[in-house]
Image (cartoon, coloured by chain):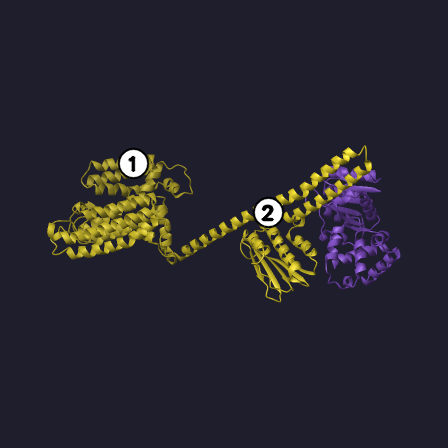
C-alpha cells in the first residue's frame, strides 16, 4: 500500500512537471488555456491518488492507471484538464465511503488526504470534513472549467443563486446524484460496498446515477428526467416486493442493511418504497407529456408570460403578413388594370391616330392635322391618368420632401381650412411614412365627403422616448357631424390593415354630433438612428 | 430672349431646345443637373430659366431648390418650373419671395406651344403663371381668410385667371366681358386684399399669393 502511494505520488509529480513544462502559448483568455499555461496538471495528483487507493491491493492496476494519466496529460492536455473535476469528485466520494466504513467499525487501513485511516473514533469526522472540502472544490471546478456537464451546471448554479426565479422541475432532478451521495453517507445500507453491490436496489441506484451522469454529459435534460422517473418507479416497486416476499423467500436485499440480523426491515422497506413510488408516479406523466411535445410545467412565471407573449405575437404577425400580402396583391391588380385601361389604351389610340395622319398627309393635310391634334390630346390624357396612378402608388411630394411636407401638401389640397401642427424631429422611414400619409389622406377624404365639417386640425408628432424606435402619432380632428363608423365601408378598415403591418393602430372617436377624432399610432424605426449607427 | 434649360432626360431636353429654338428663343445653356443649373442661372443670367423639379443628384426636388437658391442670389430671376405633377406647396414656395417672375406648369403644357411660349414671355416680364390644375385646387378651397372670402364669385374667377398668368385682355376674352370690367374687378380685388397701389404686375403676384395663403 505504501509502495503504491509513493509510486502514485512520484508518477503524479512527474506528470505534473511534464504538463507544466509543456505549457505553450494557448489562448490566454480561455480558462482551459490558463489551466494549461499554469501547469494545473498538478490537480491530477488527487486523481492518481484516488485511483491508486481505490484500487486497493491490486498493485498491477495502479501503474497502468497512472501511465494512462501521464499519457493523457502529455498528449491530451485538454482532455486531462476536463477530467480534473471528476478526479476530485471521485476522491470526495471515496472519502465519504471511507468515513462510513469507519463509522460501521471497519479498520480499513488506507491513506486518505491527510490522515491514515486506521483505528480511532476521531478518524471518520476528519475524513468526512476533508471529503466535503474536496466535494466543494470539485463542484467549483466543474462550474469554472468546461468539463462535460459544466454547461448544465453553470446556469443551474446561477439559478439557485438567484432564488427569485425559482427552480424548475427538470432542474431539481439534477439533485438526484447529490441525494444519492447523502443517502450513501447517512443511510444504513452499504451501496458502494462489496456486499451491497450484489443487491438489486443498489445496482439500480448505481445505474440510475450513472445514467443521469451520462445524460448530463450528453446534455439531454429531458432524458435525464425520464431516467429519474423510471428509476424511482422501479425502486418503489422493488421496495414493496421486498416487503411482501421477504417472509416467503427468506432472502433478498432491501433498503435496510440486510447483512445485519434486523428484527423487522419490512415496514421501513414498505415506507421507503411507497415514497419512491409516489414520487415516480407524480413525475412520470409530466415527463411523458414533455416527450409528447407539451411544455413542462415551469414554475418560472416570467418565462411563461414571455412564452404567451411570443405566441400572441406570432399569431398577430401571421395575420398582418397575410393582410399585407393580400393588400399588395390587390394593389398590383388595381395598378395593372388602371394601366391597361388607361395609359396603355391611350398610347395605342395615339399610335393609331399618328399612323392615320401619316397616311393622310399627302392627300388631305387638314384631316391629318386634325388627327395629330387628336393624338396630342390622347397623350395629354394618358399623362393625366399616369399622374393620378403615381399619386396613388407613392405621392411624389413624399418621395421628394418626406412626411411633414407631404402632409402639408395634402392639407393644402383639402377644400377646407386646415390647422396644422407638425413636430417631427427626425426623418421617418419611407414605408412607415407612406402608411401614415395614406391613413391621413383617407381620413381627410372621409371628412371632405361625409363630415360636413367647417375646419380640420391635423397633428403629427413623434415621441422618441416610447420604444426603441420612437412612436409616430397622427391625429385628425374635424368639427363635422360625427357618427363615423370604422367598421362600415372599406376605407378605414383598409387603413387599419395597412397600419397593422407596422404594428400601428387606428382609433376613431366619433360621437353623433361630432367632433370626430382619428388617431394613428405607428412605432417607427427612425432613419437618423439607423444611419448614425451604420 | 435668352433661356437656360434644365432637364435630366435627354429626349425631353433636346425636345425643349428644338421647340424653343424654332420659336426664336436663344438657348444660353441646356443642363442636366441641379448644380449645373445653379451655376448657369447665376452666371448666364438668362431672361428665363426653364427648370424640371426632379433633377440629379438626389432625383427629388433638386431642380426646385436650385431655382429657389438662384432667386435668393439674384432676386427676381425669372424661373419657369416644369413638373410631372403640381403641388400647391411648391407654388407657395416659388411665390414666397413676392418678387414675381415665376411660372409653375405641368410638363404636358408644353404640347400647346403657343400657350407655353406665352407663359415664358409672361414670366420673363415678371408675371406669374400657375398651372390651371393648381388654380383649380385653389378654387376648390373654402377660405376662412376674411379678405379672400369677401371677394365676389366673379372676382374670384378673375383672380384665378390672373394666377394662371393671363393678361386682362385674355381674361376679358375668356369670361366674355369687356376689358374695362376686368380692370374694375382687378381693382376691386386689390382693394379687398389691401394691396396698396404699385405697379400692376407686382400687385397681381401679391393677389395670387394672398389667394394661395388663404
Instruction: Say what secondary structure mark 2 lies in.
Output: helix
Q: Mark 1 points at which residue?
A: A70
Location of the C terminus of chain A by quadrant is top right
| Chain containing the residue with disc 1 | A
Instruction: Identify the image quadrant of residue A56.
Output: top left
Report whether mark 1 lies on the same chain as mark 2. Answer: yes
The tint of chain A in the picture is yellow
Rendered residue at 42%/41% (across/down): A28
Task: State the residue in front, B135 or A369.
Answer: A369
Task: State the residue in front, A387 or A428.
Answer: A387
Task: State the residue in front, A518 or A152.
Answer: A518
Q: Name the residue under label 2.
A: A331
Single out the mark in the foreground, 1 or 2.
2
Residue A113 showing in the rendered view: no
Task: State the residue in front, A377 or A421.
Answer: A377
Give percent across and percent down for residue B150: 78, 64
The tint of chain B in the picture is purple
Q: What is the number of the mark on residue A146? A: none
Give percent across and percent down for residue A520: 58, 57
Vertically, is A62 above or below B208? above
Give percent across and percent down for residue B95: 77, 53
Give percent across and percent down for residue A376: 75, 41
Amino acid at each position: 500500500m505504501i509502495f503504491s502511494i509513493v509510486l502514485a505520488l512520484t508518477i503524479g509529480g512527474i506528470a505534473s512537471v511534464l504538463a507544466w513544462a509543456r505549457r505553450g502559448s494557448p489562448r490566454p483568455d480561455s480558462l482551459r488555456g490558463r489551466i494549461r499555461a499554469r501547469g494545473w496538471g498538478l490537480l491530477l495528483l488527487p486523481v492518481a491518488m484516488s485511483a491508486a487507493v481505490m484500487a486497493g491491493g491490486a498493485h498491477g492496476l495502479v501503474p497502468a492507471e497512472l501511465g494512462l494519466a501521464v499519457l493523457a496529460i502529455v498528449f491530451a492536455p485538454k482532455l486531462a484538464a476536463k477530467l480534473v473535476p471528476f478526479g476530485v469528485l471521485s476522491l470526495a466520494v471515496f472519502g465519504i465511503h471511507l468515513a462510513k466504513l469507519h463509522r460501521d467499525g471497519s479498520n480499513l487501513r488506507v491513506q486518505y488526504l491527510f490522515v491514515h485511516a486506521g483505528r480511532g473514533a476521531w478518524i471518520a469526522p476528519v475524513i468526512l470534513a476533508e471529503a466535503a472540502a474536496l466535494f466543494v472544490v470539485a463542484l467549483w471546478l466543474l462550474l469554472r472549467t468546461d468539463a462535460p456537464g459544466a454547461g448544465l451546471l453553470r446556469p443551474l448554479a446561477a439559478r439557485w443563486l438567484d432564488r427569485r426565479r425559482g427552480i424548475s422541475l427538470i432542474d431539481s432532478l439534477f439533485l438526484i446524484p447529490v441525494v444519492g451521495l447523502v443517502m450513501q453517507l447517512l443511510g444504513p445500507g452499504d451501496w458502494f460496498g462489496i456486499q451491497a453491490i450484489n443487491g438489486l436496489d443498489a445496482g439500480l441506484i448505481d445505474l440510475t446515477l450513472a445514467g443521469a451522469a451520462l445524460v448530463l454529459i450528453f446534455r439531454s435534460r429531458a432524458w435525464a428526467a425520464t431516467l429519474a422517473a423510471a428509476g424511482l418507479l422501479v425502486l418503489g416497486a422493488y421496495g414493496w416486493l421486498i416487503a411482501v416476499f421477504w417472509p416467503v423467500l427468506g432472502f433478498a436485499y432491501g433498503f435496510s442493511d440486510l447483512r445485519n440480523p434486523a428484527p423487522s426491515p419490512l415496514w421501513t422497506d414498505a415506507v421507503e418504497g411507497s415514497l419512491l413510488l409516489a414520487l415516480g408516479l407524480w413525475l412520470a406523466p409530466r415527463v411523458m407529456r414533455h416527450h409528447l411535445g407539451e411544455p413542462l410545467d415551469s414554475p418560472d412565471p416570467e418565462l411563461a408570460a414571455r412564452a404567451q407573449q411570443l405566441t400572441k405575437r406570432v399569431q398577430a404577425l401571421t395575420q398582418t403578413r397575410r393582410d399585407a400580402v393580400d393588400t399588395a396583391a390587390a394593389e398590383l391588380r388595381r395598378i395593372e388594370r388602371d394601366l391597361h385601361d388607361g395609359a396603355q389604351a391611350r398610347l395605342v389610340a395615339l399610335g393609331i391616330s399618328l399612323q392615320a395622319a401619316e397616311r393622310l398627309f399627302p392627300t388631305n393635310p387638314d384631316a391629318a392635322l386634325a388627327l395629330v391634334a387628336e393624338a396630342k390630346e390622347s397623350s395629354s390624357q394618358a399623362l393625366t391618368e399616369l399622374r393620378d396612378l403615381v399619386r396613388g402608388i407613392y405621392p411624389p411630394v413624399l418621395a421628394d420632401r418626406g412626411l411633414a411636407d407631404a402632409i402639408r401638401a395634402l392639407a393644402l389640397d383639402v377644400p377646407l381650412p386646415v390647422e396644422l401642427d407638425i413636430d417631427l424631429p427626425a426623418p421617418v422611414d419611407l414605408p412607415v411614412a407612406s402608411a401614415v400619409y395614406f391613413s391621413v389622406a383617407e381620413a381627410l377624404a372621409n371628412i371632405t365627403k361625409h363630415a360636413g365639417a367647417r375646419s380640420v386640425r391635423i397633428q403629427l408628432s413623434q415621441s422618441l422616448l416610447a420604444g426603441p424606435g420612437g412612436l409616430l402619432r397622427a391625429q385628425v380632428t374635424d368639427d363635422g357631424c360625427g357618427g363615423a363608423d370604422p367598421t362600415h365601408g372599406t376605407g378605414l378598415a383598409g387603413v387599419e390593415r395597412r397600419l397593422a403591418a407596422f404594428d400601428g393602430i387606428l382609433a376613431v372617436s366619433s360621437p353623433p354630433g361630432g367632433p370626430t377624432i382619428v388617431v394613428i399610432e405607428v412605432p417607427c424605426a427612425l432613419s437618423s438612428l439607423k444611419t448614425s449607427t451604420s | 430672349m435668352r433661356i437656360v434649360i434644365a432637364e435630366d432626360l435627354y429626349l425631353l431636353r433636346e425636345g425643349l431646345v428644338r421647340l424653343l429654338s424654332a420659336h426664336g428663343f436663344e438657348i444660353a445653356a441646356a443642363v442636366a443637373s441641379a448644380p449645373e443649373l445653379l451655376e448657369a442661372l447665376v452666371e448666364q443670367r438668362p431672361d428665363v430659366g426653364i427648370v424640371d423639379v426632379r433633377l440629379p443628384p438626389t432625383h427629388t426636388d433638386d431642380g426646385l431648390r436650385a431655382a429657389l437658391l438662384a432667386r435668393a442670389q439674384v432676386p427676381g430671376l425669372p424661373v419657369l418650373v416644369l413638373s410631372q405633377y403640381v403641388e400647391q406647396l411648391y407654388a407657395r414656395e416659388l411665390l414666397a419671395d413676392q418678387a414675381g417672375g415665376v411660372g409653375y406648369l405641368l410638363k404636358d403644357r408644353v404640347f400647346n406651344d403657343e400657350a407655353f411660349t406665352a407663359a415664358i414671355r409672361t414670366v420673363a416680364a415678371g408675371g406669374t403663371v400657375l398651372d390651371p390644375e393648381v388654380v383649380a385646387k385653389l378654387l376648390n378651397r373654402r377660405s376662412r381668410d376674411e379678405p379672400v372670402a369677401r371677394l365676389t364669385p366673379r372676382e374670384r374667377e378673375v383672380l384665378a385667371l390672373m394666377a394662371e398668368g393671363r393678361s386682362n385682355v385674355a381674361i376679358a376674352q375668356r369670361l366674355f366681358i369687356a376689358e374695362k370690367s376686368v380692370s374694375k374687378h382687378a381693382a376691386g380685388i386689390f382693394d379687398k386684399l389691401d394691396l396698396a397701389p404699385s405697379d400692376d404686375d407686382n400687385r397681381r403676384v401679391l393677389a395670387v399669393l394672398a389667394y394661395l395663403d388663404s
